[in-house]
Amino acid sequence: MPAPIHVPRWLSAPEPGWTRTADVIVVGSGIAGLTAALRLREQVDSVLLVTKTVLNEGSTAWAQGGIAAAMDPGDSPEEHLRDTLVAGVGICDVDAVTALVHEGPTRVRELVSLGAEFDRGPTGEILLTREGGHHRDRIAHAGGDATGKEISRALIAALDRVRTDPGIHVVEHAIVVDLLQDEEMRVCGVTLHVIGEGQVDGVGAAYARAVVLATGGLGQIYSATTNPSVATGDGMAIALRAGAVMADVEFVQFHPTVLWLGEDAGGQQPLISEAVRGEGAFLVDGDGVRFMRDIHELADLAPRDVVARAIVARMRETRTDHVFLDARHLGREFLERRFPTILASCRSHGIDPVTDLVPVAPAQHYASGGVRTDLDGRTSLEGLYACGECSCTGVHGANRLASNSLLEGLVFAHRIADDISGRFAAGELPASTPVHPSDDTVLVASKHRVDIQRTMTAGSGVVRTAASTAATAAALADLAATADGSEGGPKSWETTNLLHLGQLLTHLAALREETRGGHVRDDFTARDDVHWRGHTHVVRGADGALTTSFHPTPDQHLDQP
């Protein structure tokens, strides 16, 4: 059994030097945070939107492929449901997926009404394409391969139109340090650091009747990732320290086709969207062999975990560190029109997909687990909500279906806003007073971030074993022992957040003795539905110790690969 983990309650930080109050605080400015803030503004008196850098620097703007919704007359929510459940490998929450696929088309049309401009055909219809795991063309895209950027632009434009509204206030360049709670553990605000506000250190306290976490994922926990530099798992980590239930954190999706830039490359890597394969590109090894056709009925468009595992296996067989994506047959005119961003990125690295094979390898892409929520985005802590990648709604199960992430943020942000406004109208979630932070604090020096990333990549990355996770757990425990609180500031807060999440993820990866979805065990290569078809939950107790529980999911009656 893995050794017990102790997680302190607070990050070491100065006392707040200023305060602010709102009805609701929304943390994050991706599709989930912006949608929640805009809808809440219509229903409550005051909303404070906090974002870590500037509004358009989150993960949403980097989404290339598109947003999935059953909008074609020949498609149906039921078919989208089935594809999602199959990709989730038996542990999706069926009710959550049902809400996603049935409400999704309406929410996408609302985006269009808000000003989002999706690519359209000659008669004005929204063009739809296909990605891995989908049996229908249901991926709406914009700017060819710049869907996230267009959605972010439209939402920010909508926010700009109401900037003068006293009911909504935006604070950029702000990192949330911890959640504030009252004597009954109800969340009633946050501590945050804003560059240039209040005292020199910039730390303040914001109070609210409800807090919505929409902070994105934990991509920077690994050496190579498709995530932007701001994705340091802050929302997940502050929820963990406050005592919220965390779920399925071991399920990390590694995108199969990330541009391979050499063995020493690190940080955010260029993504080659699954939509390229959706349009007909295919994978080959160094000898030109198309290896996916013998592995899955959907070949190169199999679910991401299947493709990523197949690539890793082929790399081992051929003793190489990458394979190739062949899109040459699609032609210059099509590729430059459909994938201008990807072509520009590849060409900037000396690779032209029009004439060259594109070297690719899996890299960290998406966290399927996070802060556990119900169908209205409520967490286990009163007053705390979560949506988007930092949450675990149960939609993704063990492996997110391609292009379901933007849709999840959109659908559940609406649900959260409606739930909060309804509870306010019913007199629920009254304002309360936070208790003073205790001295149970921690802070790890920012210089250890690269050590955390290398350790996680080596032992809790694409392929895991009992030995590798044990080594990772021991190395992270040694890093935790170095915490002395001597540095302080955003970089060390981020590093400490990554450490806590790395310990949690590694703990769960060691416990789950099977291979399922994004969790791959080299020593337990089969899926084990008898013992492991279900969710792993973890909660931090008052003493700082993490307690793990297992929650089986009902049989979904699907013939899953």
Image (tube, grey):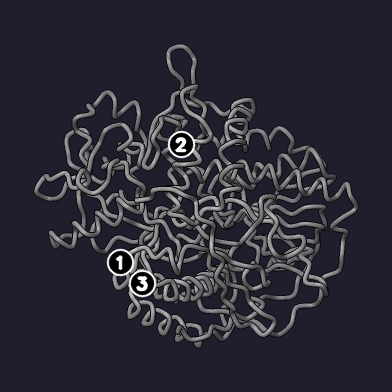
Residue 261 screen position, x and y as percent: 26, 54
Marking on residue 66? 2
User: Looking at the image, which residue is at 60% across and 46% down?
Assistant: 55
User: Looking at the image, which residue is at 33% across and 74% down?
Assistant: 465
Q: Quadrant of residue 252?
A: bottom left
Residue 478 screen position, x and y as percent: 45, 86
Marking on residue 373? none
Q: Nearer the viewer, residue 170 or 545?
A: 545
Marking on residue 525? 1
The kind of residue tagged 2 is Gly
Q: Quick one: quadrant of the N terminus?
A: bottom left
Q: Are marks 3 and 2 in contact (CB under 8 Å)?
A: no
The kind of residue tagged 1 is Thr
Horizontally, residue 534 falls left or right of residue 354, namely right
Q: Can the viewer see residue 424 in this picture?
A: yes
In what element is the residue under mark 1? loop
Q: Hey, which residue is sitting farthest left in the picture?
A: 287
In what element is the residue under mark 3? helix
Disc 3 residue crowd, few under 14, some 14–19, many 20+, Cα 10 Å? some
Q: Can the viewer see residue 358 in this picture?
A: no
Q: Nearer the viewer, residue 367 or 267?
A: 367
Q: Are marks 2 and 1 in contact (CB under 8 Å)?
A: no
What is the CA distance from the residue labelled 3 to the residue labelled 2? 31 Å
What is the CA distance from the residue labelled 2 to the residue labelled 1? 32 Å
Marking on residue 454? 3
Vertical relation: 228 (above or below) 79: below
Q: Nearer the viewer, residue 29 or 522?
A: 522
Mark 2 or mark 1: name the one nearer the start of the chain.
2
What is the CA distance from the residue labelled 3 to the residue labelled 1? 24 Å
Mark 3 or mark 1: name the one nearer the start of the chain.
3
The kind of residue tagged 3 is Arg
